[in-house]
Each structure stands twice: as structure tokens, then as C-alpha cells.
Image (spheres, rainbow, N blue to C red):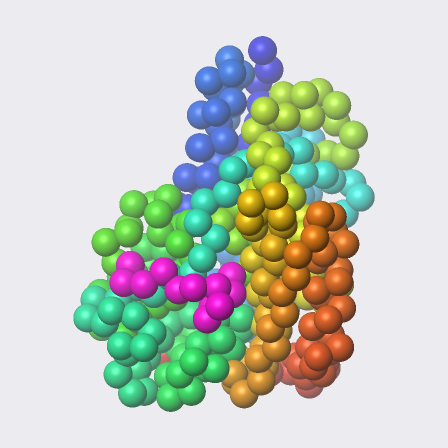
Amino acid sequence: MAHLRIGSRGSQLALWQANYIRNLLQERGHEAEIEIIRTTGDKIADVPLSQVGAKGMFIKEIEEALAGERIDLAVHSLKDLPADLSHAFELAAIPAREDPHDVLCSIRFGGVKELPPQARVGTSSLRRQAQLKAIRSDLEIISLRGNVDTRLRKLIAGEYDAVILAAAGVHRLGKWEFVRQVIPAGELCPAAGQGALAVEIRADDLTMQQHLAFLDHAETRVATSCERALLTKLGGGCQVPIGALAEMRGATLHLDAVVARPDGTKVVRESGEGADAVALGESVGAALLERGGAEILAEVYDRGVAPPLQP
């Protein structure tokens, strides 16, 4: 059996993910170790994501280690990976997905609609900000970065009335007691790939393909391929106000997607069904662009947008 080197960011959640994959590999008889790699996104943790704009900022240094053969595979949150992955790499496996939804965490309030007027809500995501503002234009959206523990500590300290996090991360780290609402995708559509992991390798590494094939979950790969095809069609990444959630409904693949102005004054939603994941993502993406998404994205890319306020 092989001795495998796994590259990962050093956050608590990233290490949970890397250890999850390591344990599965060890169950197959492989030896595996984790190398922690600090990324650009980790180095500028005090800046709102919407202001950074660095494509692949959570993976660049990890991919450099992969290309230089310091590591054999990398474990990422799939939503951190650009939709247009470099030809030097490939996704060997996308394991079964956790809950892809966003959740509202709070000490005192039961959900988005129960928040008081002008409530302070923590998030650094333009996607979350835009959709929250569409539901509750009175909310004060305050920039919030850091790992899950850091964000929850600030919530407990009273700096925020609520914070919005990915359900998958909260569940994986055993912090579900803070969750007050799992927000429906019709109100807060998740990021493309949210809740899914990505196991990345060097392109055409046949040995690693064989070692990792058992990790791949067919339904999750189909759904996330659809979401990422939409993202490619829109030309967006994880720092822009685009949401996408694909799921099997019976034997049919269904896709819900959204493009929203950061201030919530315009939200364009579209959905569709189809048998071909990539074609479905592209067609729903085209519909969003035609119905006003192109104008919204032009504002985001060309003119700049106001990120969430700093606390």
C-alpha cells in the first residue's frame, strides 16, 4: 500500500476535512500524513472576501505544493475551487456531500424573520448579504471572517445578533447547538459546491486516480458539476453574489440558481431540470444572464461594490 501526503489548509475545519479523507485512506490500508499549507486567503484574514478578489486565494499555495510533488493530493472545500480548474490538475474524487444549505446561528433569535429591526448579522459573503437584504432590507450586515470557532465566539460575545455559516462546517465541527434556522434555498441559495469536498491531484496521475476512486460519490459529482457549469457560464467565483444548488429529485436533476445585486434591490432567480448536468448548468446560467444577471455582474466586476461593513 502507498504512503500518501495530503495537503490542507490549517484551519480547524480544513483539518477535519483532511483527517476525514486520511482516515478513509487508512481504512484501505494506505499510510497517510497531512502537510499544513498556509494560503493567501489565510494570510489576509482581516479583509472582507469581496474586497480581496484573488482568484483561488484558498488553494494557490496548495496547488503549488501539488505541482512540485511535495504532496500527492489536496483536500479542499469544493466551493473554494475556481470553476475553471487548471489543466495541470484534476478532481480525482468528490465524496458524498454534507447538507449544502446556509444556517443562521444566534443566541437569542430563532431565524431571519425573528431578528429585530437593524439587527447586526455577520457574514463576509456578498451572496449571503444580497439575499438577506432582499428578505430584510433593514438588517445591518457586518463583515465577519475567521474560522467557525472565531465567528461563534464573536456571536457569544454579543458583537452580532446572528451569524450566517455553512451548515456543513457547523455540523462537521459539532457546533450545531448554535443553529436556529436552516435557511431554505428559495430564500438563501447556497454557493456552488457548498457542503462538498474536493480531492485534487496532478492531472493524469493514474496511480492516485486508482487509490482515490473509491471516494468519489456519483450523485454528488453530478450535482456539483451542474453547479460549477453554471458558475463558469456566469464567469463567477465564490466572492460574487451567485448561488446554485443542484439535486436529484427522483430520477431528474433539478437546479435552482440566483444572481443578486449586493444591496438586495434586485434578485434574479432561475431553475431548470435536465438529464445532462453541464448542459443544465449552462442553460440556467444563460437564462439568468438574459433576465438581468449580466447587468448585476457587470456592476460587481466593473464598478466595484460595497462589501459588508467592518464591525
Name the residue at the left extreme: 108
Residue drawn at x 58%, y 34% as measured from the top left: 217
Q: Measuring 67% from the left and 38% from the top, which residue is drawn there? A: 91
- Residue 276 located within the stretch drawn in magenta: no
Task: Point out the image quarter for the N terminus.
Answer: top right
Q: Foreground residue, 280 or 308?
A: 280
In what quadrant of the picture does the C terminus appear? bottom left
Judge whether residue 65 can be spotted in this image: no
- The image position of residue 209, as x and y in percent, is 69, 26
216 lies above or below 261: above
- Left or right of 91 on screen, residue 6: left
Q: Residue 141 location, x and y as percent?
A: 41, 79
Give residue 3's position: percent from left, percent from top. Answer: 57, 18
Please say whether residue 298 is visible from this viewpoint. yes
Q: How many marks?
A: 0
In this picture, residue 136 sits left or right of residue 44 = left
Residue shown at the point (57%, 29%) measured from the top left: 215
Determine which quarter of the picture holds residue 145: bottom left
Q: In this view of the protein, which residue sits in the foreground, 226 or 122?
A: 226
Q: Kindly identify the residue that appears in the image at 23 percent across and 54 percent down.
A: 177
Residue 182 drawn in magenta: yes
Image: magenta residue range = 179-190
